[in-house]
Image: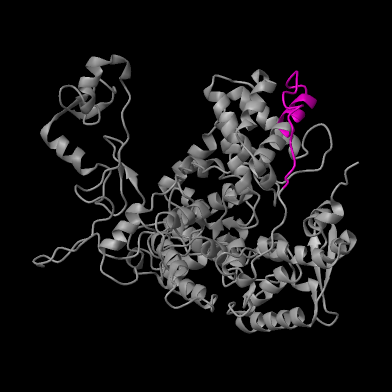
Amino acid sequence: MGKEWWTKLRQQRAVPAGPLVLEPQVQGQIPLFTVPRVLSDATATAIADRTVAGWEDARPVIEAMQAEHRLTVAWRCKIGEMVRLALAVREAEGAEGLPEAMLRDLPGNGDAVRLILLRTGLLDEAPEPLRFSRTNQLTNTPYITAPPPLPPPAPRQCSDCDAWIPAGRRAGFVCDPCRHWRERNRRGRCCRCGRDGLALRDDRCRSCHPYRLLDEARPATRRFTQLVISLPTGKGGPFEAFPVGDPEVPDYDERRPALHMSRGQRALFTIRRDWAPVLQRLRSAPTGEPPLTEAARRMVEEFTQARPGQRPDYKKNTRTLTILLYWLGADAVIHERDVYDLARIDVNLAAKPVCQFLRDRDLLVEDPALHRDPHQVWIEDTVAALPERMASEVATWVTLLRSQGPRENEPRSYEGIRRYLGALQPVLTGWVASGMVTLREVTSTDTKSAVENLSGYARRGLAIALRSLFRALKRERVIFLNPARDLPVGDIEGLPRSVPSDLLAGLLDQAPTPFGKFVIALVAVHALPGSDIRALRTEALDLSRGTLEVRRGFLRHTLYLEQFTHQLAADWLTYRYQRWPTSTNPHLLVSQKTAVDPDHPAVHPGMLRLVLPKGVTPEGLRQDRILNEALETADPLKLMRLFGITERTAMRYVKAAHPERTAKLPR
């Protein structure tokens, strides 16, 4: 085999026995940690006498390649060492096939070993063929006819300053600034970092030279150097060349899609965006839609087709989605907070429909803070504005009203608690301004003074809120005495009033749509309050039986529709199904927005007021209807069955309609 190979064999036999190298593992066992191996010729020598599984299958392939391409015996021996080393790594990994990427750990000849293991079926191929040599393989390796492409150049560090050199720059391991630094300065040992063989100026290398003044001021900072990235001077990032002699220099701020994140790519830093510069950039650009990628353009078209009822001139939603996709791209997920922040700075943008569209396509990261009850958020902000001790006491009261205390009570909604706290807020603010820091300082005189200058509903509401607050704190032993215990609540002595007949005349004729006519019939004929009308469900209307079921919590009140209301209900259903045939909103009454809203909200209270002429309110029409029925009959039970009102409310209307029957006779 040659003299040098006999010499290597004698050296191998003379190596003393040491720890086992590349110890075989159980096949199929998954390693807990995977680290790159450092393989060398010494590793190949250490396993020379070992029996390696798969070597008997690979040896004929090596000999066939040698004979086919007329290669030397030295090539066969060298490739044989590398193949045995690769098979030993396969055993050490416990794998049936050696992963192709592990061939990078071999000292050399990775491409030949890859080809041999492929022919023997012992290689686990990568999704794309790997290449391990940068030489011209078509010339130097005749057995490789179609070499894989070279891998992209990876960033590397400068050997002098340790700065990262971007991929694609000139070859070598010295950056351009250090190369010029070497040409102008002598070599030596840096007095700051202690490294030897570097070009020095003032006894410092290029990395330590900017710190010379700082070292004199604070010597404790020595031996620390900022790591940098070596970029070309001028514009950051990849350099965009333009033809020499072109009269117009390219505008790097031209209107083109922004740089987007790829699908699955995670952001390094997550911060709240400021959309004002983006809108300013779009406003200063030429007119027209911003340029979008093909995927973003298809998404905008899909969004437009999903909202067929949208007017052509109403593009708030489409404009919002276009800006988001222009700036963030169609592949990256979009944070819900970004959508609302963008819509908040311009009245011509909308957020909710865009969020619903993105949520259906799993492209939205929802923000829990945006889905909280707005009444709850207002309560927390109001309580937080109070002094610490007083805020803790008010928070205890709110918790009890929500039935989250030690005793079980009927829970109150955040809307009802907000009405209580809204009445209390001016009083609490006044007590804080007077120097109080806790509700333990409040006396009965303070509570009476708070309601002294009020009357009517305002006085009654504040008195009820004060009694509720201090009664709860006394029960929880937060305060010693209840200062609102003897505070009179009073009663509202006002009587219901009828609507003038001139306002009622032609009321239905003034309603232009089936929606308005049906709402007027429900209020003026059946005396339904606005909250009940908005909560009506489509399945509650039974036209075959002529009934409409009204849900009030766990209670049910059934309306028996006469011919007039029955016809208006049928007209409204026909109009709704013709205009919004694909609407899935379960509410009986819908508007242009709520009909296509995936969240299925009820109509806004303002929609009920818009169908009535000026000077007429739904509550006034309801009172007029009940009062008119009370004039016809003085039976409160009939009023309770007909309108679903309480006994106290029925007696109040009977008293207003027939005062002579309810007056107290003198003794």
User: Is 581 situated left or right of 310 in this image?
Assistant: right
Residue 126 percent across, percent down from the top left: 53, 61
Q: Specify the segment rendered in magenta.
A: 468-493
Please name whichever residue, 515 or 401, is drawn nearer the observer in this view of the structure.
Answer: 515
Residue 109 can be seen in this image: no
Please name whichever residue, 273 or 287, is drawn nearer the observer in this view of the structure.
Answer: 287
Main secondary structure of the magenta stretch: loop
Q: Residue at x 59, y 31 (%)?
A: 427
Residue 124 can be seen in this image: yes
Relative height, residue 585 to residue 403 (above, below): below
Residue 539 percent across, percent down from the top left: 78, 73
Residue 574 percent across, percent down from the top left: 68, 84
Q: Quadrant of the C terminus?
A: top right
User: Is 626 situated left or right of 100 in this image?
Assistant: right
User: Is 592 situated left or right of 194 in this image?
Assistant: right
Residue 385 percent across, percent down from the top left: 54, 31
Q: Quadrant of residue 197?
A: top left
Please name whichever residue, 253 or 238, is drawn nearer the observer in this view of the structure.
Answer: 253
